[in-house]
Image (cartoon, rainbow, N blue to C red):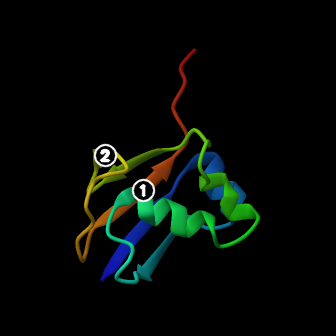
């Protein structure tokens, strides 16, 4: 299944990209599994790793790691927003 992934703010800077489309393997069925897969790509991708404070949205709605992915979904990852 193919999904569109967007990266915002400091994640975009750390990863060096703002978006990509990925064909996911059959094992990547949830938002949490996608995040773990992305984090396994290498050093800079550890910005998405376990224990990092990263928020996620699925089709423009905040989502938990257990959210199930479907073909054509849009996933966005971003750091928490702080105000001042």
Residue 59 drawn at (x, y percent): 26, 57
Q: Earlier in the sequence, mark 2 or mark 1?
A: 1
Relative to 65, say whether 4 is above or below: below
Which type of secondary structure does the marked residue at label 1 adopt? Answer: helix
The quadrant of the image that shows the N terminus is: bottom left
Q: Is residue 31 left or right of residue 59?
A: right
In the orientation shown, which residue stands out farthest toward the right? 43
Q: Is residue 30 left or right of residue 39?
A: left
Mark 2 or 1, which is nearer the eye? 1
Residue 72 drawn at (x, y percent): 25, 75
Residue at left 72%, top 70%? 42
In the orientation shown, which residue stands out farthest toward the front? 27
Which disc, if any, is residue 32?
Answer: 1
Q: Is residue 8 left or right of residue 43?
A: left
Judge the density around disc 1: few (<14), some (14-19), many (≥20) Cα neighbours within 10 Å: some
Which type of secondary structure does the marked residue at label 2 adopt? Answer: loop
**Residue linked to disc 2:** 63
């Amino acid at each position: 299944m193919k999904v569109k992934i967007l990266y915002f703010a400091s994640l975009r800077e750390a990863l060096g990209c703002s978006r990509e489309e990925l064909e996911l393997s059959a094992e990547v069925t949830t938002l949490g599994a996608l995040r773990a897969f992305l984090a396994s790509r290498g050093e800079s991708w550890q910005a998405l790793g376990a224990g990092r404070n990263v928020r996620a949205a699925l089709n423009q709605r905040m989502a938990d790691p257990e959210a199930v992915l479907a073909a054509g979904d849009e996933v966005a990852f971003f750091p928490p927003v702080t105000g001042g």
